[in-house]
Image: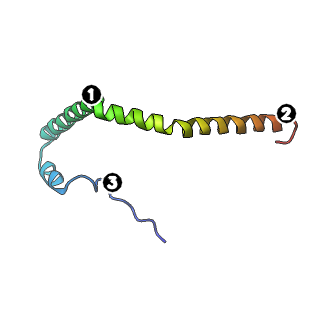
Amino acid sequence: MPKVEKDQFGDVPEEFKEVVEGLGTDDIRKKVAEIALNQVELMKAKKEDQDLAEKREQYKSAGEIYSSGTKLNRKKIEYLKTLLESKGGA
């Protein structure tokens, strides 16, 4: 079955594409700068979002048992691999 290529810009609204395709290079550069500034503002708002920070902390706390268990299991496996190597069984 042939692999279907996903449109790299499929998520970009068609209206946006139509507008910017008609712009000259200077206006495209201005649009890039405008979007970059919007992204900076978005990241700043995300960083200052107290509700998001609280939920992130709750998520971290709720998943602690799983992450600590996973870390311990990795260490156990690593120890067993080292033990096997030292006994010539690797």
User: For residue 7, which numbered disc appears in the image?
Assistant: none
Question: Which residue, given by chain and number where applicable, does mark 2 sit on?
Answer: 86
Q: In the image, 11: left or right of 76?
A: left
User: What's the distance in space between the residues labelled 1 and 3, CA to CA?
Assistant: 31 Å
Which one is in front in this view, the residue at disc 2 or the one at disc 3? 2
Question: Which residue, given by chain and number where applicable, does mark 1 sit on?
Answer: 48
- The residue shown at (55%, 40%) is 66
Q: How is the image coloured?
A: rainbow
Mark 3: amino acid: Gln
Mark 2: amino acid: Ser
User: What's the distance in space between the residues labelled 2 and 3, CA to CA?
Assistant: 50 Å
Within 10 Å of the Cα at label 2, are there few (<14), some (14-19), or many (20+) other Cα atoms? few
Residue 24, image x, y percentages: 12, 43
Q: Earlier in the sequence, mark 2 or mark 3?
A: 3
Q: Nearer the viewer, residue 78 or 66?
A: 66
Q: Nearer the viewer, residue 82 or 38?
A: 82
- The residue shown at (16%, 35%) is 34
- The residue shown at (29%, 34%) is 51
Question: Which residue, given by chain and number where applicable, does mark 3 sit on?
Answer: 8
Query: Relative to residue 66, is residue 5 depicted above or below?
Result: below
Q: In the image, 15: left or right of 78?
A: left
Within 10 Å of the Cα at label 1, are there few (<14), some (14-19), or many (20+) other Cα atoms? few
Residue 82, image x, y percentages: 78, 34
Q: Earlier in the sequence, mark 1 or mark 3?
A: 3
The image quarter in which residue 39 lies: top left
Residue 20, image x, y percentages: 15, 48
In the rendered image, the residue lying farthest to the bottom is: 1
Residue 48, image x, y percentages: 27, 27
Element type at mark 3: loop
Mark 1: amino acid: Glu
